[in-house]
Image (tube, rainbow, N blue to C red):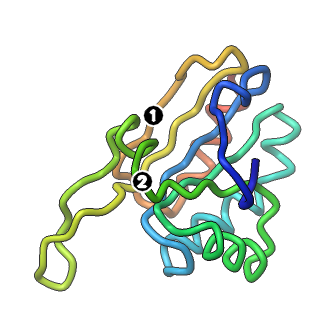
Amino acid sequence: MGTSGAVDLASLRGRALVLYFYPKDATSGCTTEALDFQSALDAFAEAGVRIVGVSRDSLASHARFRERQGLGFDLISDSDESLCTLFDVIRTKSMYGREVRGIQRSTFLFDKAGRLRQAWRGMRVPGHVAQVLEAARAL
């Protein structure tokens, strides 16, 4: 797991999981979201929940992002969009007047048996991690 290899999601069973999809490493909103998860990392751990972020960035980009921001959770590189497709998070967005394909910011909470318990799609960053933590504590 982590920034150095492939991940089999089935191997994550046995512990609750927050899988969050974000558009791009080192952008303002994505950095804020990552730092929000990082600041709540101990609280998620106390609730028995693991945090994993996913974007289409490369493993090298993830490694730089994790190091620069001091992130203590794993980031998955989904360069082939297989996870993004599985979770249906790729959307056409307008950026600077142009249409581009990108990841819709989304978070999925799984219980320790691997069942999806809650999904947040297209949400805003402020206050989001607190909502996810509240739902995680209720598992």
Which is more toward the observer, 91 or 44?
91
Which numbered dot is residue 40?
none
Where residue 105 sits in the image (x, y, percent)? 41, 55
Q: How far apart are marks 1 and 2 (CA)?
A: 22 Å
Where residue 120 sits in the image (x, y, percent)? 43, 40
Which quarter of the picture shows residue 115? top right
Q: Say which element carries label 1.
A: strand
Q: Residue at x 76, y 35 (%)?
A: 49
Does residue 100 appear to the left or right of 54 in the view shown?
Answer: left
Label 1 sits on residue: 119
Disc 1, disc 2: CB below 8 Å? no
Exactly how many numbered labels are in the figure?
2
**Disc 1 or 2, which lies upstream in sequence?**
2
Q: Relative to 37, does residue 64 appear above or below in the rendering?
A: below
Which is more toward the observer, 83 or 18?
83
Which quarter of the picture shows residue 92? bottom left
Where residue 41 sits in the image (x, y, percent)? 80, 53
Where residue 66 sits in the image (x, y, percent)? 73, 71
Q: Relative to 67, does residue 129 appear above or below in the rendering?
A: above
Q: Which of marks 1 and 2 is in front?
A: 2
Q: Say which element carries label 2.
A: loop
Type of the residue with mark 2: Asp
Q: Which residue is drawn at 63% across and 32% down?
A: 9
Q: Which residue is drawn at 46% across and 42% down?
A: 83
Which numbered dot is residue 80?
2
Does residue 25 appear to the left or right of 120 in the view shown?
Answer: right
Does residue 76 appear to the left or right of 43 in the view shown?
Answer: left
Type of the residue with mark 1: Ala
